[in-house]
Structures are given as structure tokens and as C-alpha cells.
Amino acid sequence: MILEGQTGRPEGETDGAGWLESLVRARRARDALTQRLLEAMAVLGRTRIAIAAGESAGDRLTAFAAELEMDATTHAEARRQVEALAG
């Protein structure tokens, strides 16, 4: 995996705390992305079952898209706030 392969200490890195903090952030990002992927797979599975049962998939997918948009907006705002605090 991309993040797994980038957890080694960079050449010449002397700040152990900074390296460890970066590693923790990378792992948290990986975990969050994995969780979102699992959620998306679950929604697609439920949508597939609904289609097989003769239901419309449009409403389910529209709701999921709205949820993803809200999450993206929330993450972008949080990032802006952190960057503003970091200066």
C-alpha cells in the first residue's frame, strides 16, 4: 500500500518526535480512508440488493452522494481552521 511503504524514516531525519507524529497522522489518514471505502462498499451492496428487489437505486445513491459532499465540506473547513491556527 502507498501509505504503508512510506512509513520508513526519511534519510537524514533527526527529529524523532516529528517523524513519529507524521507516521501517526499517515496511519490515521489511512484508517479514515479505509473506513470511508468500507462505508461506500456497504452502500453499494445495499443499493445492489435494493435494485434486485425492484426498488429505485436513485434515492439511495442521491442520499449517499449528499452525505459524501457534507463530509468533504466538513473536512475542508476543518483543514482551513487548522491551517489558520498553525499560521
Image (cartoon, rainbow, N blue to C red):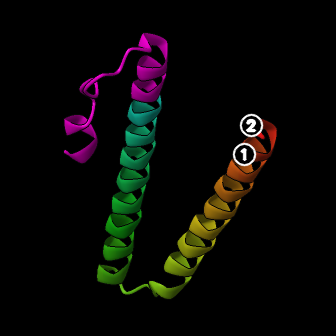
The quarter of the picture where residue 45 lies is bottom left
Q: Residue at x 44, y 41 (%)?
A: 29
Relative to 59, say whether 1 is above or below. Answer: above
Horizontal side of 48 relative to 39 (left or right) equals left
* Label 1 secondary element: helix
Q: Which residue is mark 2?
A: 86
C-alpha span from label 1 to label 2: 5 Å
- The reply to whether the C-beta atoms of the residues labelled 1 and 2 are less than 8 Å apart is yes
Residue 69: % across, % down: 62, 70
Please say whether residue 50 is one of the residues in the magenta stretch.
Answer: no
Q: Which residue is mark 1?
A: 83
Q: Residue at x 25, y 26 (%)?
A: 11
* Label 2 secondary element: helix
Horizontal side of 25 relative to 81 (left or right) equals left
Q: Quadrant of the C terminus?
A: top right
Q: Amino acid at mark 2?
A: Ala
Q: Quadrant of the N terminus?
A: top left
- In front here: 10 or 73? 10
Range of magenta residues: 1-24
Residue 58: % across, % down: 50, 87
